[in-house]
Amino acid sequence: MKLYMAVTPDRYELPLAPPDTAKNLAELFGTTPNNIWAQVSHQKSRGERKRVNYHNDIGVRFVLVWLTILRFFKTISS
């Protein structure tokens, strides 16, 4: 499951909002879902985050969060 999270644009990437859909985060931070998808896409294409890529007006970086831990717990419990 893919969720998006808003984090600080520094090396610590502290969470600013809980993981949610791109649409809900866009409404919360006053941007568009396309902006969030583009930021995540550019981060993946660069591999390491060599350049800071964040929404300049609000100082937020959007990252993709994969929820694979839920599958792990489901396999243990069954």
Image (cartoon, rainbow, N blue to C red):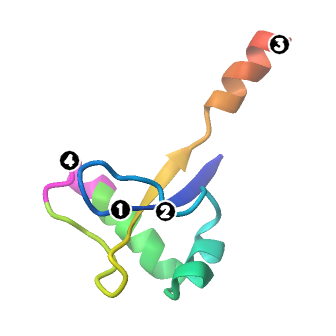
The residue at 75%/11% (across/down) is 76
From the top left corner, tell me how far across and down residue 22 is, in percent: 58, 70
Is 10 within the magenta? Answer: no
Q: Is residue 48 magenta?
A: yes
Give whichever of discs 4 and 3 has the lower sequence position.
4
Tell me if 77 is positioned left or right of 18 in this view. right
Instruction: Pinpoint residue 51: horizontal percent, then vertical percent.
Output: 15, 63
Rendered position, 70 above or below 75: below
Tell me where residue 60 sits by quadrant: bottom left
Q: Earlier in the sequence, mark 4 or mark 2?
A: 2
Say which label, 3 or 1, has the lower sequence index. 1
Query: Label 3 to label 1, Cα distance in Å?
Result: 35 Å
The secondary element bearing badge 3 is classed as helix
Q: For the residues labelled 4 and 3, say whether their Cβ atoms are less than 8 Å apart.
A: no
Q: Name the residue tied to disc 1.
A: 8
Residue 34 in the image: above or below residue 5: below
Q: Tell me if label 3 and label 2 are in contact, CB under 8 Å.
A: no
Which residue was labeled with disc 4? 48
- Pick whichever of labels 2 and 1 is earlier in the sequence: 1
- State the residue position of label 3: 77
Q: Do the residues bearing badges 3 and 1 touch, measured as CB atoms within 8 Å?
A: no
At mark 1, the secondary structure is loop
Residue type at tag 2: Leu
Residue under pointer 2: 16
